[in-house]
């Protein structure tokens, strides 16, 4: 399903990543952090809102103002947040997004 690619600048290099390789994206202090299984890339090429628009039809979901997650990697959704494959931390989900996140994860699991 996630077959696109994203191109951005990180540390003076141009990086090209498959959507499938992205576990989640976070935003802090005008920086975007794109997390993969191997590393975290920092960029200012996009805002979190621009990335949400770009990725919204490709299996990604907004968790809150600062996080976007690839539903393919979501293991569990709770009131405290989500657990993702390969990530030890729990990512926060705002109360307004919990229902939509659960719905998206359930739909993804039914389609697999």
Image (tube, rainbow, N blue to C red):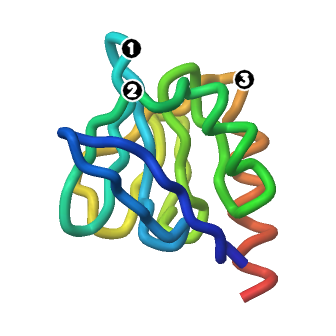
Tags 2 and 3 in contact by the CB under 8 Å rule?
Answer: no
**Is 87 in front, or is 25?**
25
**Is 36 in front, or is 71?**
36
Question: Regarding mark 1 in the picture, which secondary structure is present there?
Answer: loop
Q: Which mark is residue 44?
A: 2
Q: Nearer the viewer, mark 1 or mark 3?
A: 1
For residue 98, which quarter of the picture? top right
**Residue hosting label 1:** 30
Residue 42 place in picture, x, y as percent: 27, 37
Residue 48 place in picture, x, y as percent: 55, 28
Q: Label 3 crowding class (10 Å Cα cut-off): few <14, some 14-19, many 20+?
A: few
Q: Is residue 11 left or right of residue 86?
A: left
Q: Which residue is drawn at 27% across and 58% down?
A: 87
Tags 2 and 1 in contact by the CB under 8 Å rule?
Answer: yes
Q: Earlier in the sequence, mark 1 or mark 3?
A: 1
Q: Which residue is drawn at 32% across and 61% down?
A: 36
**Residue hosting label 3:** 96
């Amino acid at each position: 399903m996630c077959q696109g690619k994203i191109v951005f600048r990180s540390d003076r290099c141009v990086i090209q990543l498959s959507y499938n390789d992205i576990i989640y994206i976070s935003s802090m202090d005008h920086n975007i952090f794109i997390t993969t299984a191997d590393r975290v890339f920092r960029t200012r090429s996009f805002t979190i809102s621009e990335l949400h628009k770009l990725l919204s039809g490709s299996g990604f979901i907004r968790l809150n103002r600062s996080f976007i997650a690839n539903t393919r990697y979501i293991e569990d959704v709770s009131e405290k947040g989500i657990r993702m494959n390969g990530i030890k931390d729990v990512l926060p989900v705002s109360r307004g997004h919990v229902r939509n996140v659960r719905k998206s994860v359930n739909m993804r699991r039914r389609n697999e």
